[in-house]
Image (cartoon, helix red, strand yellow):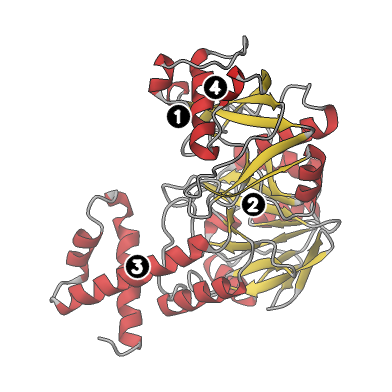
């Protein structure tokens, strides 16, 4: 993605009487669902022709117009009126952050600090935000450190700067041109580290999330670099932060490529379910070599996160041996390939089973973790995306059933159900159709 495709955005850091205002994004939003953030959004083309009373010599007029519009839309606050009445004391640029290249949509966001004399009344747009709260930067940082708040890196950097320095320092520039020689850690929840590793996965995804979890005993989950260049980038990071165990959620190559070499390099156990061990052994008899293998079953404690035991939860369906991890307080749940933030999960025989997949989705929904984290894509607040996935799968199954009753073959179903979908993905879509048909046969529906 070139620089021309990076869109400009703006964020309002509203400050008043030693407190800052943040909002929680609704779980149904397509990006940063459930995250705590500052109000803001894209700068629109029309903003370039607008005008505003806001004054900030460091910012372009369109940026100021954009921030006034976004704050009005999201919070019902008229910054122009507040400026004219003397309620806006200062407006200045805190810094700038650009979404890293791995993101499907990229933004260059200006963070503007706006100091207000008094707190204005809010009229929250509940289509976008579920809550708004004023509190000190120190309190926001303390809440994040309990592991209960989702924050994107530039938001956390801003809160940290405000808490430690009163915001006088510029926000860390998160520009990333992909030329760095070390993989990057993102920590949306305190102590929950995501490492987006370029992998040989299915399109449109290009990366598989590796996770580094543990207060003192550090478990590296699903390291799967695409090649030795990416492996070297990952190893440079692990050399710095450490690793006590490598764990595989399931056997698919985009979750385990080079994981055996990583475990051998650090002389640590390779952990997995027994079913995954058997699948890998059948596919690649020499994969494990002399590694120390650790087999986990349901309820086993893998490590501790913020003092909470992190336990194994079997999540078959996409893959019979797939396991997930969740702390006892249900603050997060690694769902692996149950859903994908990018693309669609394939339920393919013989390891995949659609009926089991339906049951597992419902199982995790019933567990009700606060945050779910897929292997491809970003962390998401609540189980909303799991619920929507299950609804979608049920609708797709109903469509398959109707087409079957209409006498359509699986090949005909494919062209009807996946019209407009990239034809490169049709072989995987065909597998899902066959799995739906198998489920319907097993249930004696057809």
Residue that badge 3 annotates? 432
Specify which label sits upstream in the sequence, 3 or 4. Answer: 4
Q: Which secondary structure, mark 4?
A: helix
* Numbered label attached to residue 210: 2
Q: Distance of mark 1 from mark 4, alpha carbons?
A: 36 Å
Q: Nearer the viewer, residue 227 or 412?
A: 412
Q: Quadrant of residue 48?
A: top left
Label 3 to label 4: alpha-carbon separation: 54 Å
Q: Nearer the viewer, mark 4 or mark 2?
A: 4
Q: Which of the two labelled residues, at mark 2 and mark 1, occupies the earlier sequence position?
A: 1
Position in image of residue 302 (x %, y %): 77, 68
Mark closest to the chain's N terminus, 3 or 2: 2
The answer for how far apart the CA atoms under marks 3 and 2 are is 26 Å
Quadrant of res 219: bottom right
Give whichever of 378, 428 is nearer the camera: 378
Residue placed under numbered mark 4 in the picture: 80
Q: Which of marks 4 and 1 precedes in the sequence?
A: 1
Q: CA distance from mark 2 to mark 1?
A: 23 Å
Instruction: Name the mark on residue 1.
Output: 1
């Amino acid at each position: 993605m070139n620089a021309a495709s990076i869109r400009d955005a703006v964020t309002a850091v509203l400050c008043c009487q030693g407190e800052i205002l943040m909002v929680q994004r609704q779980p149904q939003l397509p990006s940063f669902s459930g995250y705590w953030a500052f109000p803001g959004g894209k700068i629109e083309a029309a903003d370039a022709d607008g005008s505003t009373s806001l004054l900030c010599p460091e910012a372009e007029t369109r940026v100021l117009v954009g921030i006034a519009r976004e704050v009005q839309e999201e919070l019902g606050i008229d910054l122009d009126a507040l400026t004219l009445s003397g309620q806006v004391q200062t407006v200045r640029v805190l810094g700038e952050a650009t979404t890293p290249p791995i993101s499907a949509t990229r933004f260059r966001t200006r963070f503007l600090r706006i100091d207000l004399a008094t707190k204005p009344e809010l009229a929250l747009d509940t289509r976008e935000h579920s809550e708004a709260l004023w509190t000190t930067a120190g309190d926001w940082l303390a809440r994040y450190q309990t592991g209960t708040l989702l924050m994107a890196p530039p938001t956390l950097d801003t809160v940290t700067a405000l808490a430690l320095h009163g915001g006088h320092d510029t926000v860390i520039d998160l520009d990333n041109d992909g030329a760095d020689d070390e993989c990057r850690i993102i920590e949306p929840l305190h102590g929950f580290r995501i490492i987006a590793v370029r992998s040989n996965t299915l399109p449109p995804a290009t990366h598989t999330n590796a996770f580094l979890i543990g207060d003192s005993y550090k478990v590296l989950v699903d390291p799967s670099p695409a090649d030795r260049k990416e492996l070297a980038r990952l190893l440079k990071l692990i050399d710095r932060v450490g690793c006590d165990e490598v764990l595989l959620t399931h056997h698919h190559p985009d979750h385990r490529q080079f994981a055996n070499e990583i475990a051998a390099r650090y002389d640590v156990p390779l952990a997995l379910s027994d079913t995954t061990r058997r699948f890998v052994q059948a596919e690649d008899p020499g994969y494990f070599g002399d590694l120390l293998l650790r087999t986990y079953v349901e309820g086993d404690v893998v490590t501790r996160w913020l003092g909470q035991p992190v336990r194994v939860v079997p999540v078959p369906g996409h893959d019979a041996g797939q396991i997930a991890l969740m702390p006892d307080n249900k603050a997060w749940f690694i769902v692996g390939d149950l859903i994908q933030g990018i693309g669609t999960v394939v339920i393919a025989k013989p390891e995949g089973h659609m009926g089991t997949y339906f049951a597992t989705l419902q199982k995790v929904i019933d567990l009700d973790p606060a945050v779910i984290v897929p292997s491809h894509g970003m962390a998401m607040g609540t189980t909303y995306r799991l619920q929507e996935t299950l609804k979608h799968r049920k609708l797709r199954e109903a469509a398959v059933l109707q087409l079957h009753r209409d006498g359509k073959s699986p090949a005909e179903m494919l062209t009807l159900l996946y019209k407009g979908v990239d034809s490169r993905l049709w072989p995987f879509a065909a597998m899902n159709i066959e799995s739906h048909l198998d489920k319907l046969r097993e249930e004696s529906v057809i």
